[in-house]
Amino acid sequence: MSSMEKCVFCRIGANELPVELVFENDEFVAFRDIKPVAPVHVILISRKHFSTWMDISDSGILGRALSGVQEVAKSLNLADDGFRTVINCKGNGGQTVYHFHIHILGGRFMSWPPG
């Protein structure tokens, strides 16, 4: 079994695991995080497996992912008050699931720097 077959986000992107879906299109899926750190905590994933941000060579994918973030923010009424996006990359960046994803956090004030 390959590492992609074991990847939990690949399984979510293939609709093999149940999630609280917020947004989807042919290329991306967004769902509520099972361990939220904010009142609104959604994860947007690419259906195609990329282990990290650094493995994406097509900048168009990144642009379309950010368009997906905009759609999620609008649909969850985060656009007016604001929200935070987080992309963790590799170990020192805090990445724990090695499948490209973007955290969308909102519903409260976000201080800087993050804790």
Image (cartoon, grey):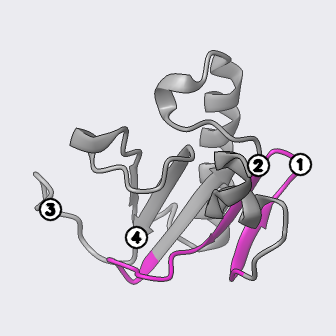
Residue contact between numbered discs 3 and 2, judged by CB atoms under 8 Å: no
Q: Residue furthest front?
A: 1
Task: Pick whichever of labels 4 and 3 is earlier in the sequence.
Answer: 4
Say if the magenta span includes residue 104.
no
Q: What residue type is labelled 1?
A: Asp
Q: Is mark 3 on a helix, strand or loop?
A: loop
Kindly report the distance in space between the C-alpha atoms of the residues bearing marks 1 and 4. 25 Å
- In reply to whether residue 23 is colored magenta, the answer given is yes
Question: How far apart in space, not on screen, are marks 2 and 1 (Cα)?
Answer: 8 Å
State how far apart marks 4 and 3 are (Cα).
12 Å
Among the two numbered marks 4 and 2 on one chain, the one whose residue lies closer to the N terminus: 2
Q: Are marks 2 and 1 in contact (CB under 8 Å)?
A: yes
Q: Distance between the residues labelled 3 and 1?
A: 34 Å
The residue drawn where x is 23% and y is 65% is 110
Residue 58 is situated, as x and y percent measured from the top left of the image, at 68, 17
Of labels 2 and 1, earlier in sequence is 1
Q: Name the residue under label 1.
A: 26
From the viewer's perspective, is the residue at label 3 or at label 1 nearer? 1
Callout 4 crowding tier (Cα within 10 Å): few <14, some 14–19, many ≥20 = many
Residue at 48% x, 63% y: name it.
80
Report the residue marked by disc 3: 111
Mark found first going from the N terminus, 1 or 4: 1
The range drawn in magenta is 19-40
Q: Which of marks 1 and 4 is in front?
A: 1
Residues under labels 4 and 2: Cα distance? 23 Å
In front: 109, or 14?
14
| Residue 106 numbered mark, or none | 4
